[in-house]
Amino acid sequence: MLYAVVDIETTGGHASANGITEVAINIHDGNEITESYTTLINPGRAIPAYITALTGIDEEMLANAPAFEDVALQIYQLLHGKVFVAHNVNFDYSFLKHHLALAGYDLQCRKLCTVRMSRKIFPGKVSYSLGKLCNALQIPLQNRHRAAGDADATSILFNLLLEHDLEGTIPEMLKKTSKEQVLPPNLDKAAIMRLPNQPGVYYFKDSKGKIVYVGKAKDLKKRVTSHFTGNKPNRQRQDFLRTIHHVDYVVCGTELMALILEANEIKRLWPENNRAMKRYEHKYDLYVFEDQNGYLRLAIDKHKKNNKALQSFNNLLEGYNFLNQIVDKYQLCAKLCYLQKTATRCTAHENGQCFGACSGIETVAVYNKRLTSALDDIQNMQPSFALVDEGREHEELSCLVVEKGRFYGMGYFKDKNYLADGLASVKENLSTYQSNSYILNLILNHAEQHPQKLYKL
């Protein structure tokens, strides 16, 4: 078996928007290096100052260097059919695979990561960065942050790993069924193996234990593993993979409960890598307030975090349609509900729909009594029910409660008779969570699709 021990230098941290400035490849037969290749590469773009400060490579050095496509065939031939070995292998592999693809070559190699191998074969080191690991193992490291120097040090490290692999770690990593080569360099495979094949929420953490991503899963093990398949070259993915050191999880009874917990946890923790759910909020709400003349007024307005809403809507049209129905049913003033913006009395007054609150004809007491009836009707229209489903284990049941159109909470119990004591008793045994229209719509859609799980309260 032949190995290609690789190191590259680049203009930045992700392949899709950056170029390669240097490549070094040592062909290793399992005992020693049999062939070496190194070249500078002109990336065809500016070299950032911090890259020059780190590597010493500047634009003047690369002025006469070949473009990547000029050496792509030679690099491909050196790597093809070999096991691709590197320190944090997915970084180097993603760059070379991406740029070889642009040149017309499809790189497909098995991979070995010397970070992951070192964590298993030389456990307990303070750091597994190449520089600190070489220092701990007394490996000479010359020309640090240059491709040839780092590739030579990685080759010596690989020799030591092969020599000290008494438990067959490396052959195990090379098996097709092994996930080692696709996992982030700092994430222990044992953490993945511990994950159950159950619904739940998972938390990716960085080296300091800070949660950087929250996700939900129908099957925790499959979903977490799926994050690490493929070799996407974009910055977000590469930065994300480097950040992950730990994974924790919470098992849920159902996928619906996992979705709800995920939404609440993202709002609570605000992880830096969760983007879509952060942006979600219902956009419009129905509010009631008293104006300076004492009239109660209904209004559709943009969602305000600290204001209590009577009803929430995904768009303005949905809100206005609902308000128009209330105005028609209770003969409220369209102008006082901001459905008309006339300078004088509302047009509905002419046909008897409005009794003149907009012009002071109808008294505050009479108008407010009718509007209060409308508010009671809005509240009574909101459903209260429980959804009962599978629990986290055998003979356990899960319960989600909606009270007057707002999600209240969820929890677990052993016996359906638990519901017989009424809403107050049920609520005592639930964990409360934030409600929004996203969560409520999830629950309402699930209840509509599975009426057999629905218990009215």
Image (cartoon, rainbow, N blue to C red):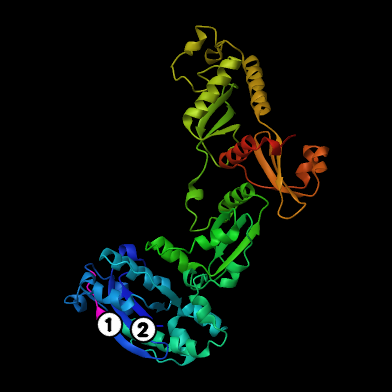
Q: CA distance from mark 2 to mark 1?
A: 10 Å
In this view, the residue in front, 198 or 330, is 198
- Residue 312 magenta-drawn? no
Q: Position of residue 97 (x, y in %)?
A: 34, 68
**Please, what secondary structure does the residue beneath circle 2 have?**
helix
Residue at the image position 58 percent from the left and 14 percent from the top: 331
- Residue 40 magenta-drawn? yes
- Looking at the image, which residue sits at the far left? 64
Which amino acid type is shown beneath numbered disc 1? Thr
Number of numbered markers = 2
Residue picked out by circle 2: 151
Residue at the image position 63 percent from the left and 67 percent from the top: 194
Local packing at callout 1 (Cα closer than 10 Å; few below 14, some 14-19, many 20+) is some
Q: Position of residue 389 (x, y in %)?
A: 70, 45
- In what quadrant of the picture does the N terminus appear? bottom left
Q: Is residue 88 above or below residue 286?
A: below
In this view, the residue in front, 106 or 51, is 106
Residue picked out by circle 1: 38
Which amino acid type is shown beneath numbered disc 2? Ala
**Please, what secondary structure does the residue beneath circle 1 have?**
strand
Q: Is residue 437 left or right of residue 426?
A: left
The answer to which of marks 2 and 1 sits earlier in the sequence is: 1
Q: Is residue 82 above or below residue 218?
A: below
Local packing at callout 2 (Cα closer than 10 Å; few below 14, some 14-19, many 20+) is many
Q: Position of residue 397 (x, y in %)?
A: 74, 48
Which residues are the magenta region? 38-43
Q: Is residue 317 above or below residue 450?
A: above
